[in-house]
Image (spheres, helix red, strand yellow):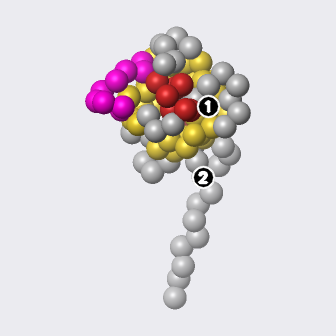
Amino acid sequence: MSRSVPTPRGSVLIEHARIRENQRVAPEQFQLLLESPRIAARAQPGTFVQVSCDEDGWLKRPMSLLDARGDRLDILYKVVGKGTQRLSTRPAGTHLSIMGPI
């Protein structure tokens, strides 16, 4: 009987991603478009990133990727607590610390 051995996914990267858009798409739901060339190049379906929701970056939130192409990551998130509430107020042009793909 043969077994397949999982292929290693490689290193997890930390990147300071620039917010391209952070817009409300439904009540309490936002689409976040990040400029993150190194992580976007490695992202695959089913992966996620850890996103710093505020300036101190103390506690990152895991968020699954909606899409990744070119240098861009798309994330759809719902405001459910203080961290994502802070994230929903971050304007385009600011930067977030992110870690991934995981």
Q: Position of residue 34 (x, y in %)?
A: 49, 24
Residue 12: image quadrant is top right
Decide: few, some or many residues near mark 2? Use Cα within 10 Å; few <14, some 14-19, many ≥20: few
Real-space Cα separation, disc 1 to disc 2, in angstroms: 22 Å
Asked whether 32 or 68 is in front, the reply is 32
- Tag in front: 1 or 2: 1
Residue underneath mark 1: 52
Point out which mark residue 63 bears. Answer: none
Asked whether 80 or 25 is in front, the reply is 80
The residue type indicated by label 1 comes to Ser
Q: Are marks 1 and 2 in contact (CB under 8 Å)?
A: no
Q: Which residues are magenta?
A: 21-29
Decide: few, some or many residues near mark 1? Use Cα within 10 Å; few <14, some 14-19, many ≥20: many
SS at mark 2?
Answer: loop
Which of disc 2 and disc 1 is earlier in sequence? Answer: 2
Q: Quick check: 58 above or below 9?
A: above
Residue underneath mark 2: 9
Q: Position of residue 21 (x, y in %)?
A: 42, 18
Asked whether 63 or 68 is in front, the reply is 63
Label count reads 2
Q: Going by the picture, which residue comes out furthest to the left?
A: 26
Which residue occupies 61% across, 31% down? 52
Which residue occupies 56% across, 14% down? 94
Q: Position of residue 15 (x, y in %)?
A: 64, 28
Which residue occupies 41% across, 37% down? 78
Q: Position of residue 70 (x, y in %)?
A: 45, 27
The residue type indicated by label 2 comes to Arg
